[in-house]
Amino acid sequence: MNDRAAPASPYTVAAGDLHADRESVIALWKINPLQPALADAKYQWFYLDNPNGPTRQLLLHHGPQAECVGAAGMVTRQFVARGAALSAGLLTDLFVQSAHRSLLPALLLQKTMRAVGLAQHDFVYGYPNDKSLPIVRRVGYTTLGHLAKFVCLLRHHEHLGRWLPRGPSRVAGAIVDHLLPLVFRPHRHLLKGWRGEWLEAVDDRFDALWKRTAQVDGIIGVRDRRFLSWRFFDRPSHSYRVFVLSPRQGTEIAGYAVCEALGNTLHIRDMLVAPQASGAQRVLIHLLALQARAQGHTRLSFEFLGDEASRRALRAAGMHERGKTPLVVAFRPEMMATVERLDWYLTAADTEL
């Protein structure tokens, strides 16, 4: 019989102090593939200026000297489920030094963060990559769905150039570019009731839109003016504009799309349409696609997890699924009855990106 005890793990996990441990965490980030020049600004914005609630941070220590070799964060997000407020923890910024990237350190960080998160929030969620997915499943997270990337090609000559010579691809692309907006264009009687415009910031009308949306029969992250201002327009090193849809005879907002232009793609980072505005989502995407094409973009992209009706509306507007990222969630046991069988509405706004 072997009476020898298993060797003690050289790793320990402890709660970090957002201010006292700031430099240690940023030093880890700079070792990893995060732009070093942006690390400090991101830390201030994402961890310290978050208006949604307290941010948690765990530090991974190694050896008798308790060297800091890893960290993981969890930022607070506010959700509603059928109008009832929920507190959520978003898993973020898991970094481990390359010399310590074995299963045990990552497992220890994730297991501890799950326990910390569920002690503070109704649920904890995240979007793990392929390497992290087995780890988070092992510590008790469930894959609830996928954040799908929907893409609409706006200029087709480059795509057709894979099969056709340059000249014919340009001619064929121009024809397709002209015809497709006609195929996916909403009916004229629907279009004539709406107008779209660009804004450089959000205003009180976004609070009014959120109030009309918050009672939906599902789970959605809070999208009031305060959140949108922090999430997008206070974010360092990124530039966003918001395209809003309004009735031609009114000033209220029926829907919006927060957009970021990167290269030839116009990315929709968040989109919300009042459920009472029938057909408005398709109109919003159509008008935005026209704007993007006129501005020289070749693609319109939108990451989204939602019900089948919303997905059909995206496809009807000419957007097609091109890849997906899993959503993993861990709930407090008493929350299961509240959220069971509810549809989710998530976009890139609900991620760390």
Image: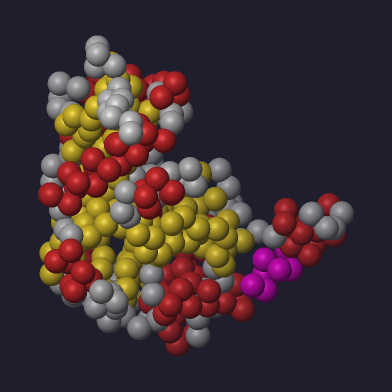
Between residues 147 and 256, which one lies in front from this camera angle?
147
> In percent of the image, x 61 and y 61: which residue is there?
153
Residue 9: image x %, image y %?
30, 26
Which portion, as a residue range, is magenta? 174-180
Q: Quadrant of the C terminus?
A: top left
> In percent of the image, x 30 and y 36: which residue is there?
108
Query: For the view shown, which residue lies furthest in the bottom direction?
Result: 189
> In percent of the image, x 24 and y 78: which residue is there?
217
Residue 18: image x %, image y %?
17, 29
Magenta: main secondary structure: helix
Residue 197 visible to the viewer: no
Residue 104 visible to the viewer: yes
Quarter of the image for residue 303 reads bottom left
Query: For the view shown, which residue lies furthest in the front direction?
Result: 1
Count of numbered tags: 0
Residue 351 among those drawn in magenta = no
Residue 188: image x %, image y %?
49, 85
Between residues 185 and 101, which one lies in front from this camera angle?
101
Quarter of the image for residue 70 reads top left
Q: Quadrant of the N terminus?
A: top left
Query: For the view shown, which residue lies furthest in the top direction?
Result: 65
Q: How is the image coloured?
A: secondary structure
Q: Is residue 43 left or right of residue 34?
A: left
> In percent of the image, x 15 and y 21: which residue is there?
20
Quarter of the image for residue 276 reads bottom left
Residue 69: image x %, image y %?
33, 22
Between residues 125 and 337, which one lies in front from this camera angle?
337
